[in-house]
Image (tube, rainbow, N blue to C red):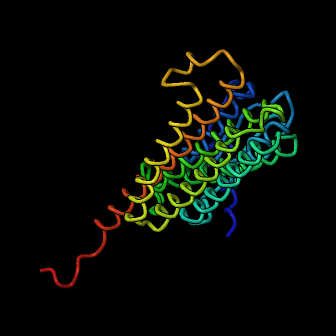
């Protein structure tokens, strides 16, 4: 199922973004905000830097397109977000998992331009699904409401993708010689373990399955202790990051372990959202026939 096209809207019905839209960074933030809020579209003065920046922004907003681009640009947003929220969550999970796979590859081999480009494309896919879900929740759509557990889980998946980017960029700073050794192998293993935890947390949220969610949370607690132990061992004992040995390699590996641990903590948040969703569905379920 494809995203619905933009609604037919008269020019005077579209909010005017004014001069704020001439700032490229502000234009991006404003367009995303109006999209998520459920606006039908916006209009603003033609950007001085050309249309490439605008198209890059719109590529993250499913169904958004330029309606007119003369002296004033008019952008329309879709009436509805097409796929069911659970399908969007599935797509977001798949894209997030690919970012983690790229991060894992970055530990094995120094990320090149092709790997970074792949990461950017997967991050764009994550943004598209999350923004569409947020827009759906703000459009008085019965399928999803603001604060819904599914929406919270989706937000955590997108944040995991952000940390996958951090891991990849940090890995790019390591030389081939620095990748050799038990520490690099442990980080690579930890990322693989985090991927499994994220997969299970997503499944618990999608079904939803409270029993699975509890199991994921228990396993994440054990896994987190292991990763924290690795970080403490690397640092030579308990200490703050600013107390690490004055060595670039030590600090680089310590940061990689910290970012990997955060992936697991967000997976825990997804599992907790699964518990909330399961409890809500049980609460809303019809009473059994034996009650009365």
Residue occupying the far bottom of the picture: 289
Which one is nearer the viewer's eye here, 85 or 193? 193
| Residue drawn at (61%, 57%) of the image | 93
Question: Can you tell which quarter of the image residue 6 is in?
Answer: bottom right
Q: Is residue 23 left or right of residue 163?
A: right
Q: Is any atom of residue 66 visible in this view?
A: no
Q: Is any atom of residue 203 visible in this view?
A: yes
Q: Is residue 179 above or below residue 40?
A: above
Question: Can you tell which quarter of the image residue 249 is in?
Answer: top right
Q: Is residue 35 above or below residue 145?
A: above
| Residue drawn at (80%, 48%) of the image | 118
Q: Quadrant of the N terminus?
A: bottom right
Q: How many marks?
A: 0
Q: Is residue 75 above or below residue 200?
A: above
| Residue 27 x, y percent position in the rendering | 70, 31
| Residue 30 x, y percent position in the rendering | 64, 34
| Residue 238 x, y percent position in the rendering | 48, 24
| Residue drawn at (46%, 41%) of the image | 225
Which one is nearer the viewer's eye here, 275 or 262? 262
Q: Is residue 200 above or below residue 288?
A: above
Which one is nearer the viewer's eye here, 4 or 209? 209
| Residue 234 x, y percent position in the rendering | 59, 30
Q: Quadrant of the C terminus?
A: bottom left
Residue occupying the far left of the picture: 292
């Amino acid at each position: 199922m494809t995203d619905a096209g933009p609604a037919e809207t008269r020019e005077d019905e579209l909010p005017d973004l004014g001069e704020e839209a001439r700032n490229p960074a502000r234009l991006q933030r404003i367009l995303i905000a109006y999209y998520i809020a459920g606006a039908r579209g916006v209009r603003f003065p033609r950007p001085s830097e050309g249309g490439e920046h605008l198209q890059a922004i719109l590529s993250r907003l499913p169904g958004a397109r330029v309606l007119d681009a003369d002296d004033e640009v008019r952008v329309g947003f879709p009436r509805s977000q097409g796929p069911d929220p659970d399908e969007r969550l599935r797509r977001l999970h798949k894209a997030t998992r690919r970012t983690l796979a790229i991060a894992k590859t970055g530990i094995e081999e120094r990320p090149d331009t092709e790997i970074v480009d792949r990461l950017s494309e997967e991050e764009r896919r994550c943004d598209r699904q999350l923004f569409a879900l947020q827009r759906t929740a703000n459009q008085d759509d019965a399928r999803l409401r603001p604060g819904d557990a599914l929406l919270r889980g989706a937000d955590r998946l997108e944040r995991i993708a952000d940390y996958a980017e951090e891991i990849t960029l940090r890995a790019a700073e390591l030389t081939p010689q620095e990748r050799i050794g038990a520490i690099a192998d442990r980080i690579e293993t930890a990322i693989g373990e985090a991927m499994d935890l994220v997969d299970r947390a997503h499944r618990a949220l999608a079904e939803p399955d409270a029993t699975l969610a509890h199991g994921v949370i228990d396993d994440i607690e054990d896994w987190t202790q292991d990763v924290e132990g690795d970080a403490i061992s690397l640092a030579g004992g308990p200490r703050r990051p600013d107390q690490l040995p004055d060595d670039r390699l030590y600090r680089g590996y310590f940061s990689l372990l910290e970012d990997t641990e955060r992936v697991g903590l967000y997976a825990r948040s997804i599992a907790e959202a699964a518990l909330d969703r399961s409890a809500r569905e049980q609460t809303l379920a019809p009473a059994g026939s034996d009650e009365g």
